[in-house]
Amino acid sequence: MKSCEVNFDGLVGPTHNYGGLSYGNVASQSNSQQSSNPKEAALQGLAKMKALMDMGFVQGVLAPQERPDVGALRSLGFSGTDAQVIKQAAKQAMPLLVASCSASSMWVANAATVSPSADTADGRVHFTAANLNCKYHRSIEHPTTSRVLGAMFADQKHFAHHAALPAVAQFGDEGAANHTRFCRDYGEAGVEFFVFGRSAFDTRYPAPQKYPARQTLEASQAVARLHGLSDDGVVYAQQNPSVIDQGVFHNDVIAVGNGEALFYHEDAFLDTEQMLAELSTKLAKRGGQFKAICVPRSQVSVEDAVRSYLFNSQLLSRADGSMLLIVPQECQNNERVWQYLQTLTSSGGLIREVKVFDLKQSMQNGGGPACLRLRVALNETELAAVNPGVIMTAPLYGSLTQWVEKHYRDRMTENDLADPQLLLECRTALDELTQILKLGAVYPFQIN
Protein backbone atom coordinates (compact mmCIF):
# COMPACT_ATOMS: atom_id res chain seq x y z
CA MET A 1 0.00 0.00 0.00
CA LYS A 2 1.44 3.35 -1.04
CA SER A 3 2.30 5.79 1.74
CA CYS A 4 3.32 9.43 1.88
CA GLU A 5 4.28 12.07 4.38
CA VAL A 6 1.80 14.94 4.60
CA ASN A 7 2.88 18.35 5.85
CA PHE A 8 0.07 20.03 7.78
CA ASP A 9 1.05 23.70 7.99
CA GLY A 10 -0.26 26.00 10.68
CA LEU A 11 -2.45 28.83 9.45
CA VAL A 12 -1.25 32.05 11.08
CA GLY A 13 -3.95 33.50 13.36
CA PRO A 14 -5.52 36.98 13.22
CA THR A 15 -3.70 38.16 16.38
CA HIS A 16 -0.15 37.52 15.10
CA ASN A 17 2.03 39.93 17.10
CA TYR A 18 5.57 40.35 18.35
CA GLY A 19 5.15 40.02 22.10
CA GLY A 20 8.69 38.76 22.76
CA LEU A 21 7.25 35.99 24.92
CA SER A 22 9.70 33.18 24.23
CA TYR A 23 12.76 33.39 26.46
CA GLY A 24 15.55 31.45 24.80
CA ASN A 25 14.28 32.22 21.30
CA VAL A 26 16.65 34.92 20.03
CA ALA A 27 14.40 36.13 17.19
CA SER A 28 11.33 36.33 19.40
CA GLN A 29 13.11 38.41 22.00
CA SER A 30 15.03 40.68 19.62
CA ASN A 31 11.89 41.73 17.69
CA SER A 32 9.72 42.28 20.76
CA GLN A 33 7.24 45.16 20.56
CA GLN A 34 7.70 45.75 16.84
CA SER A 35 4.59 46.20 14.72
CA SER A 36 3.49 42.99 12.99
CA ASN A 37 1.37 42.32 9.91
CA PRO A 38 -1.04 39.40 10.51
CA LYS A 39 -2.42 39.51 6.98
CA GLU A 40 1.01 39.29 5.39
CA ALA A 41 2.03 36.52 7.79
CA ALA A 42 -0.98 34.37 6.90
CA LEU A 43 -0.56 34.96 3.17
CA GLN A 44 3.15 34.08 3.32
CA GLY A 45 2.29 30.80 5.03
CA LEU A 46 -0.45 30.01 2.52
CA ALA A 47 1.92 30.75 -0.37
CA LYS A 48 4.35 28.12 0.93
CA MET A 49 1.55 25.58 1.27
CA LYS A 50 0.37 26.17 -2.28
CA ALA A 51 3.90 26.03 -3.67
CA LEU A 52 4.52 22.61 -2.11
CA MET A 53 1.13 21.42 -3.36
CA ASP A 54 2.04 22.60 -6.84
CA MET A 55 5.29 20.62 -6.62
CA GLY A 56 3.26 17.46 -6.08
CA PHE A 57 3.51 17.10 -2.31
CA VAL A 58 0.36 16.33 -0.32
CA GLN A 59 -0.23 19.40 1.80
CA GLY A 60 -2.67 20.06 4.63
CA VAL A 61 -3.62 22.99 6.84
CA LEU A 62 -4.05 23.20 10.60
CA ALA A 63 -6.36 25.88 12.00
CA PRO A 64 -5.21 28.61 14.43
CA GLN A 65 -6.56 29.12 17.95
CA GLU A 66 -9.10 31.52 19.41
CA ARG A 67 -7.31 34.60 20.67
CA PRO A 68 -7.38 36.44 22.95
CA ASP A 69 -8.02 33.47 25.23
CA VAL A 70 -10.62 35.04 27.51
CA GLY A 71 -11.13 31.77 29.35
CA ALA A 72 -7.47 31.72 30.36
CA LEU A 73 -7.75 35.30 31.61
CA ARG A 74 -10.86 34.44 33.63
CA SER A 75 -8.98 31.58 35.26
CA LEU A 76 -6.45 34.18 36.45
CA GLY A 77 -9.07 36.27 38.22
CA PHE A 78 -10.36 38.72 35.63
CA SER A 79 -14.16 38.91 35.48
CA GLY A 80 -17.18 40.51 33.85
CA THR A 81 -18.10 40.50 30.19
CA ASP A 82 -15.49 39.47 27.63
CA ALA A 83 -14.82 43.14 26.88
CA GLN A 84 -14.42 43.92 30.59
CA VAL A 85 -12.02 41.00 31.04
CA ILE A 86 -9.83 42.32 28.22
CA LYS A 87 -9.90 45.90 29.55
CA GLN A 88 -9.06 44.76 33.09
CA ALA A 89 -6.14 42.66 31.87
CA ALA A 90 -4.84 45.54 29.73
CA LYS A 91 -4.94 47.88 32.71
CA GLN A 92 -3.73 45.56 35.47
CA ALA A 93 -1.50 42.97 33.76
CA MET A 94 -0.66 43.78 30.16
CA PRO A 95 1.88 40.93 29.86
CA LEU A 96 -0.91 38.44 30.59
CA LEU A 97 -3.10 39.97 27.91
CA VAL A 98 -0.23 39.79 25.42
CA ALA A 99 0.30 36.13 26.33
CA SER A 100 -3.41 35.38 25.91
CA CYS A 101 -3.27 36.91 22.41
CA SER A 102 -0.24 35.01 21.14
CA ALA A 103 -0.61 33.42 17.70
CA SER A 104 2.18 30.94 18.47
CA SER A 105 -0.06 27.98 17.60
CA MET A 106 0.98 28.76 14.00
CA TRP A 107 4.12 26.75 14.77
CA VAL A 108 2.43 23.38 14.62
CA ALA A 109 5.71 21.48 14.87
CA ASN A 110 4.93 22.01 18.57
CA ALA A 111 1.31 20.89 18.32
CA ALA A 112 1.93 17.20 18.92
CA THR A 113 4.18 14.20 18.45
CA VAL A 114 2.97 11.81 15.75
CA SER A 115 3.86 8.14 15.24
CA PRO A 116 2.71 6.43 12.03
CA SER A 117 0.85 3.14 12.06
CA ALA A 118 3.88 1.19 10.79
CA ASP A 119 5.64 1.88 14.11
CA THR A 120 2.86 1.46 16.68
CA ALA A 121 1.72 -1.66 18.51
CA ASP A 122 -1.94 -1.34 17.52
CA GLY A 123 -1.33 -0.32 13.90
CA ARG A 124 -2.93 3.12 14.24
CA VAL A 125 -1.47 6.61 13.79
CA HIS A 126 -0.92 8.04 17.28
CA PHE A 127 -1.03 11.71 18.29
CA THR A 128 0.01 13.15 21.66
CA ALA A 129 -0.71 16.86 22.06
CA ALA A 130 2.30 18.72 23.48
CA ASN A 131 1.81 20.35 26.88
CA LEU A 132 4.30 23.16 26.06
CA ASN A 133 4.42 23.94 29.75
CA CYS A 134 7.74 25.79 29.58
CA LYS A 135 5.96 28.96 28.37
CA TYR A 136 2.59 30.12 29.69
CA HIS A 137 1.41 31.52 26.34
CA ARG A 138 1.92 28.11 24.76
CA SER A 139 0.75 25.98 27.67
CA ILE A 140 -2.85 27.14 27.04
CA GLU A 141 -2.87 25.72 23.50
CA HIS A 142 -3.24 21.95 23.95
CA PRO A 143 -6.99 21.69 24.75
CA THR A 144 -7.94 23.35 21.46
CA THR A 145 -5.09 21.59 19.64
CA SER A 146 -6.53 18.26 20.76
CA ARG A 147 -10.01 19.17 19.51
CA VAL A 148 -8.69 20.39 16.15
CA LEU A 149 -6.56 17.26 15.62
CA GLY A 150 -9.52 15.14 16.67
CA ALA A 151 -11.69 16.84 14.03
CA MET A 152 -9.00 16.33 11.36
CA PHE A 153 -8.18 12.71 12.22
CA ALA A 154 -11.52 11.51 13.55
CA ASP A 155 -11.71 7.86 12.48
CA GLN A 156 -10.84 5.82 15.58
CA LYS A 157 -10.15 2.79 13.43
CA HIS A 158 -7.08 4.54 12.05
CA PHE A 159 -6.19 7.30 14.54
CA ALA A 160 -5.52 7.36 18.30
CA HIS A 161 -5.33 10.60 20.29
CA HIS A 162 -3.65 11.06 23.67
CA ALA A 163 -4.07 13.98 26.06
CA ALA A 164 -1.08 16.16 26.84
CA LEU A 165 1.36 14.90 29.49
CA PRO A 166 1.10 16.29 33.05
CA ALA A 167 1.74 20.03 32.96
CA VAL A 168 4.78 20.01 35.21
CA ALA A 169 8.42 20.76 34.50
CA GLN A 170 9.47 17.09 34.80
CA PHE A 171 7.35 16.24 31.73
CA GLY A 172 8.00 19.29 29.57
CA ASP A 173 6.99 18.25 26.06
CA GLU A 174 7.49 20.39 22.95
CA GLY A 175 6.08 17.98 20.39
CA ALA A 176 7.52 17.19 16.98
CA ALA A 177 10.08 20.01 17.16
CA ASN A 178 12.19 17.53 19.13
CA HIS A 179 11.16 14.40 17.24
CA THR A 180 11.80 12.98 13.80
CA ARG A 181 11.60 9.59 12.14
CA PHE A 182 13.89 7.63 9.88
CA CYS A 183 12.66 4.95 7.49
CA ARG A 184 13.35 3.33 4.13
CA ASP A 185 9.79 4.09 3.08
CA TYR A 186 7.08 6.07 4.88
CA GLY A 187 4.84 3.00 5.02
CA GLU A 188 7.48 0.71 6.51
CA ALA A 189 8.50 0.40 10.15
CA GLY A 190 11.05 3.05 11.04
CA VAL A 191 13.16 4.41 13.88
CA GLU A 192 11.74 7.29 15.88
CA PHE A 193 14.29 9.81 17.11
CA PHE A 194 13.51 11.72 20.32
CA VAL A 195 15.81 14.61 21.28
CA PHE A 196 15.75 16.00 24.82
CA GLY A 197 17.42 18.91 26.54
CA ARG A 198 17.63 17.55 30.08
CA SER A 199 16.54 14.77 32.38
CA ALA A 200 14.16 15.60 35.20
CA PHE A 201 15.35 12.82 37.49
CA ASP A 202 18.79 11.65 36.34
CA THR A 203 21.59 14.02 37.33
CA ARG A 204 24.07 12.32 34.99
CA TYR A 205 22.74 14.43 32.14
CA PRO A 206 24.13 18.00 32.00
CA ALA A 207 21.74 20.93 31.62
CA PRO A 208 22.15 24.34 29.96
CA GLN A 209 23.07 27.26 32.21
CA LYS A 210 21.50 30.27 30.48
CA TYR A 211 18.31 29.20 28.72
CA PRO A 212 15.81 26.51 29.74
CA ALA A 213 15.91 23.03 28.26
CA ARG A 214 12.27 22.65 27.29
CA GLN A 215 12.08 18.93 26.46
CA THR A 216 12.80 16.30 29.10
CA LEU A 217 13.94 12.75 28.56
CA GLU A 218 11.05 11.56 30.71
CA ALA A 219 8.48 13.28 28.47
CA SER A 220 9.98 11.66 25.38
CA GLN A 221 9.92 8.24 27.02
CA ALA A 222 6.29 8.72 28.10
CA VAL A 223 5.22 9.59 24.54
CA ALA A 224 7.02 6.51 23.19
CA ARG A 225 5.14 4.34 25.69
CA LEU A 226 1.78 5.96 24.90
CA HIS A 227 2.33 5.32 21.19
CA GLY A 228 3.24 1.68 21.71
CA LEU A 229 6.73 1.97 20.21
CA SER A 230 9.15 -0.92 20.60
CA ASP A 231 12.62 -0.36 22.06
CA ASP A 232 14.31 -1.45 18.84
CA GLY A 233 12.49 1.34 16.99
CA VAL A 234 13.41 4.24 19.28
CA VAL A 235 16.58 6.28 19.81
CA TYR A 236 16.94 9.00 22.47
CA ALA A 237 19.60 11.69 22.10
CA GLN A 238 20.53 14.72 24.17
CA GLN A 239 20.89 18.18 22.73
CA ASN A 240 24.21 19.86 23.38
CA PRO A 241 23.51 22.17 26.38
CA SER A 242 25.91 24.77 25.03
CA VAL A 243 23.88 25.22 21.82
CA ILE A 244 20.68 25.60 23.83
CA ASP A 245 22.44 28.47 25.58
CA GLN A 246 23.14 29.96 22.14
CA GLY A 247 19.45 30.08 21.24
CA VAL A 248 18.78 26.55 19.99
CA PHE A 249 15.57 26.16 21.96
CA HIS A 250 14.33 23.14 19.93
CA ASN A 251 16.20 20.44 18.07
CA ASP A 252 14.62 21.60 14.80
CA VAL A 253 16.76 24.76 15.04
CA ILE A 254 19.94 22.68 14.72
CA ALA A 255 18.94 19.46 12.86
CA VAL A 256 16.33 18.09 10.47
CA GLY A 257 15.71 14.51 9.34
CA ASN A 258 13.74 12.77 6.62
CA GLY A 259 13.68 9.29 5.16
CA GLU A 260 17.08 7.76 5.82
CA ALA A 261 18.91 11.08 6.27
CA LEU A 262 19.82 13.34 9.19
CA PHE A 263 21.03 16.85 8.29
CA TYR A 264 22.63 18.31 11.42
CA HIS A 265 25.18 20.75 12.78
CA GLU A 266 28.44 19.40 14.16
CA ASP A 267 27.64 20.80 17.63
CA ALA A 268 23.97 19.72 17.76
CA PHE A 269 24.21 16.73 20.10
CA LEU A 270 26.10 15.17 22.97
CA ASP A 271 27.70 11.76 22.34
CA THR A 272 27.16 12.23 18.62
CA GLU A 273 29.14 9.21 17.41
CA GLN A 274 27.33 6.84 19.75
CA MET A 275 23.96 8.27 18.70
CA LEU A 276 24.75 7.98 14.98
CA ALA A 277 25.87 4.38 15.44
CA GLU A 278 22.64 3.49 17.27
CA LEU A 279 20.52 5.12 14.56
CA SER A 280 22.44 3.31 11.84
CA THR A 281 22.18 -0.10 13.56
CA LYS A 282 18.48 0.15 14.37
CA LEU A 283 17.53 1.50 10.95
CA ALA A 284 19.53 -1.28 9.25
CA LYS A 285 17.46 -3.86 11.15
CA ARG A 286 14.38 -2.27 9.58
CA GLY A 287 15.77 -2.38 6.08
CA GLY A 288 17.13 1.15 5.87
CA GLN A 289 20.56 2.63 5.27
CA PHE A 290 21.19 5.62 7.54
CA LYS A 291 22.87 8.68 6.01
CA ALA A 292 24.35 11.44 8.17
CA ILE A 293 24.99 14.88 6.64
CA CYS A 294 27.07 16.91 9.08
CA VAL A 295 27.50 20.67 8.67
CA PRO A 296 30.94 21.59 10.11
CA ARG A 297 31.19 24.51 12.53
CA SER A 298 34.12 25.73 10.43
CA GLN A 299 31.69 26.45 7.58
CA VAL A 300 28.54 27.44 9.48
CA SER A 301 28.71 28.61 13.08
CA VAL A 302 25.91 27.94 15.56
CA GLU A 303 25.28 31.69 15.57
CA ASP A 304 24.79 31.72 11.79
CA ALA A 305 22.58 28.63 12.01
CA VAL A 306 20.35 30.37 14.55
CA ARG A 307 20.24 33.67 12.65
CA SER A 308 19.45 32.05 9.30
CA TYR A 309 17.38 29.09 10.55
CA LEU A 310 19.31 26.85 8.15
CA PHE A 311 18.16 23.73 9.99
CA ASN A 312 14.61 24.92 10.61
CA SER A 313 14.01 23.80 7.08
CA GLN A 314 11.91 21.15 5.38
CA LEU A 315 13.77 18.18 3.93
CA LEU A 316 11.52 16.59 1.33
CA SER A 317 11.91 13.38 -0.70
CA ARG A 318 11.49 13.54 -4.46
CA ALA A 319 10.53 10.78 -6.89
CA ASP A 320 14.11 10.39 -8.17
CA GLY A 321 15.42 9.60 -4.68
CA SER A 322 17.06 12.97 -4.12
CA MET A 323 15.97 15.52 -1.56
CA LEU A 324 14.78 19.11 -1.68
CA LEU A 325 15.55 21.59 1.10
CA ILE A 326 13.00 24.33 1.82
CA VAL A 327 14.69 27.26 3.59
CA PRO A 328 13.71 30.78 4.68
CA GLN A 329 15.02 33.79 2.78
CA GLU A 330 17.31 34.55 5.71
CA CYS A 331 19.54 31.68 4.53
CA GLN A 332 20.07 33.43 1.20
CA ASN A 333 20.81 36.67 3.03
CA ASN A 334 23.57 35.06 5.11
CA GLU A 335 26.68 34.88 2.95
CA ARG A 336 28.32 31.96 4.80
CA VAL A 337 25.15 29.89 4.97
CA TRP A 338 24.29 30.50 1.32
CA GLN A 339 27.82 29.60 0.21
CA TYR A 340 27.58 26.36 2.17
CA LEU A 341 24.23 25.52 0.55
CA GLN A 342 25.62 26.14 -2.94
CA THR A 343 28.50 23.79 -2.21
CA LEU A 344 26.12 21.19 -0.74
CA THR A 345 23.72 21.10 -3.69
CA SER A 346 26.49 21.04 -6.31
CA SER A 347 28.36 18.17 -4.66
CA GLY A 348 26.14 15.44 -6.12
CA GLY A 349 24.99 14.26 -2.73
CA LEU A 350 21.52 13.51 -1.42
CA ILE A 351 20.34 17.15 -1.16
CA ARG A 352 20.25 18.39 -4.76
CA GLU A 353 18.13 21.55 -4.63
CA VAL A 354 17.28 24.41 -2.28
CA LYS A 355 14.11 26.48 -2.57
CA VAL A 356 13.81 29.79 -0.76
CA PHE A 357 10.62 31.19 0.77
CA ASP A 358 9.82 34.59 2.23
CA LEU A 359 8.49 33.88 5.72
CA LYS A 360 9.69 37.10 7.33
CA GLN A 361 6.62 37.61 9.51
CA SER A 362 7.03 34.17 11.10
CA MET A 363 10.82 34.36 11.19
CA GLN A 364 10.82 37.64 13.11
CA ASN A 365 8.83 35.89 15.82
CA GLY A 366 11.19 32.92 15.88
CA GLY A 367 9.69 30.30 13.55
CA GLY A 368 10.82 29.07 10.13
CA PRO A 369 9.56 26.52 7.58
CA ALA A 370 9.97 23.54 9.93
CA CYS A 371 8.18 25.27 12.80
CA LEU A 372 5.18 25.88 10.56
CA ARG A 373 4.49 22.23 9.74
CA LEU A 374 3.45 19.01 11.46
CA ARG A 375 4.49 15.88 9.55
CA VAL A 376 2.11 12.91 9.42
CA ALA A 377 3.04 9.74 7.52
CA LEU A 378 -0.09 8.06 6.15
CA ASN A 379 -0.93 5.11 3.96
CA GLU A 380 -3.61 5.40 1.29
CA THR A 381 -6.41 4.15 3.53
CA GLU A 382 -5.45 6.53 6.34
CA LEU A 383 -5.15 9.49 3.98
CA ALA A 384 -8.63 8.74 2.68
CA ALA A 385 -9.88 8.79 6.30
CA VAL A 386 -8.49 12.30 6.98
CA ASN A 387 -11.07 15.10 7.02
CA PRO A 388 -10.89 16.17 3.35
CA GLY A 389 -11.63 19.77 4.27
CA VAL A 390 -8.09 20.26 5.59
CA ILE A 391 -6.21 18.91 2.54
CA MET A 392 -4.91 21.75 0.39
CA THR A 393 -6.34 22.13 -3.09
CA ALA A 394 -6.40 25.06 -5.51
CA PRO A 395 -10.01 25.92 -4.54
CA LEU A 396 -9.19 25.71 -0.81
CA TYR A 397 -6.16 27.95 -1.31
CA GLY A 398 -8.42 30.47 -3.04
CA SER A 399 -11.00 30.31 -0.26
CA LEU A 400 -8.41 30.72 2.49
CA THR A 401 -6.73 33.63 0.70
CA GLN A 402 -10.07 35.41 0.39
CA TRP A 403 -10.82 34.61 4.03
CA VAL A 404 -7.53 36.19 5.16
CA GLU A 405 -8.05 39.26 2.99
CA LYS A 406 -11.52 39.69 4.49
CA HIS A 407 -10.79 39.20 8.18
CA TYR A 408 -7.16 40.06 8.95
CA ARG A 409 -5.62 43.37 9.94
CA ASP A 410 -2.43 44.49 8.24
CA ARG A 411 -0.93 46.01 11.38
CA MET A 412 -0.83 44.83 14.98
CA THR A 413 0.80 46.45 18.01
CA GLU A 414 0.51 45.77 21.72
CA ASN A 415 -2.07 48.53 22.08
CA ASP A 416 -4.29 46.86 19.46
CA LEU A 417 -4.51 43.76 21.64
CA ALA A 418 -6.47 45.76 24.24
CA ASP A 419 -9.25 46.46 21.73
CA PRO A 420 -12.27 44.24 22.58
CA GLN A 421 -13.26 44.47 18.93
CA LEU A 422 -10.28 42.27 18.08
CA LEU A 423 -11.87 39.35 19.93
CA LEU A 424 -15.09 39.76 17.94
CA GLU A 425 -13.12 39.92 14.69
CA CYS A 426 -11.21 36.77 15.62
CA ARG A 427 -14.33 34.82 16.56
CA THR A 428 -16.16 35.86 13.40
CA ALA A 429 -13.18 34.77 11.30
CA LEU A 430 -12.75 31.44 13.08
CA ASP A 431 -16.44 30.61 12.91
CA GLU A 432 -16.24 31.00 9.15
CA LEU A 433 -12.97 29.05 9.01
CA THR A 434 -14.45 26.00 10.73
CA GLN A 435 -17.03 25.90 7.95
CA ILE A 436 -14.40 26.23 5.23
CA LEU A 437 -12.29 23.42 6.75
CA LYS A 438 -15.34 21.36 7.83
CA LEU A 439 -14.08 21.08 11.40
CA GLY A 440 -17.32 21.50 13.33
CA ALA A 441 -17.29 23.17 16.75
CA VAL A 442 -13.71 23.16 18.05
CA TYR A 443 -13.32 26.60 19.65
CA PRO A 444 -14.37 27.57 23.19
CA PHE A 445 -16.76 30.26 21.96
CA GLN A 446 -18.52 27.64 19.80
CA ILE A 447 -18.72 25.05 22.57
CA ASN A 448 -19.55 27.09 25.68
Image (cartoon, grey):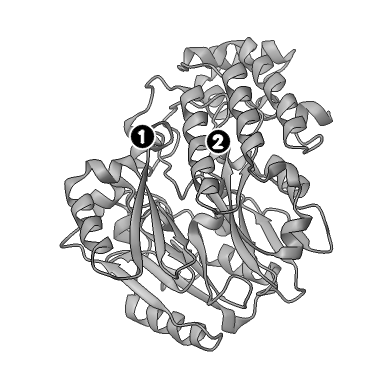
Mark count: 2
Amino acid type shown at disc 1: Gln
Q: Position of residue 434 (x, y in %)?
A: 74, 32
In the rendered image, which quarter is residue 413 located in? top left
Q: What secondary structure is marked by label 2?
A: helix
Q: Counting residues from the N terminus, which is met first, the one under dot 1 or under dot 2? A: 1
| Residue at image point 71% right, 19% down | 428
Which numbered disc covers residue 138? Answer: none
| Residue at image point 29% right, 41% down | 330
Q: Position of residue 187 (x, y in %)?
A: 64, 72
**How far is disc 1 from disc 2 in space, using C-alphas?**
14 Å
Q: Nearer the viewer, residue 317 or 32?
A: 317
Say few, some or many: other residues with alpha carbon within 10 Å of mark 2 (under 14 / 14 to 19 / 20 or more): many
Residue 47 relative to residue 3: left or right: left
Q: Which residue is mark 2?
A: 137
Residue 160 relative to residue 141: left or right: right
Say few, some or many: other residues with alpha carbon within 10 Å of mark 1 (under 14 / 14 to 19 / 20 or more): some
Q: Position of residue 143 (x, y in %)?
A: 71, 42
Q: Quadrant of the C terminus?
A: top right
Q: Which residue is mark 1?
A: 29
Examine the rendering and report whether any part of residue 307 can be seen: no
Q: What secondary structure is marked by label 1?
A: helix
Examine the rendering and report whether any part of residue 58 can be seen: yes
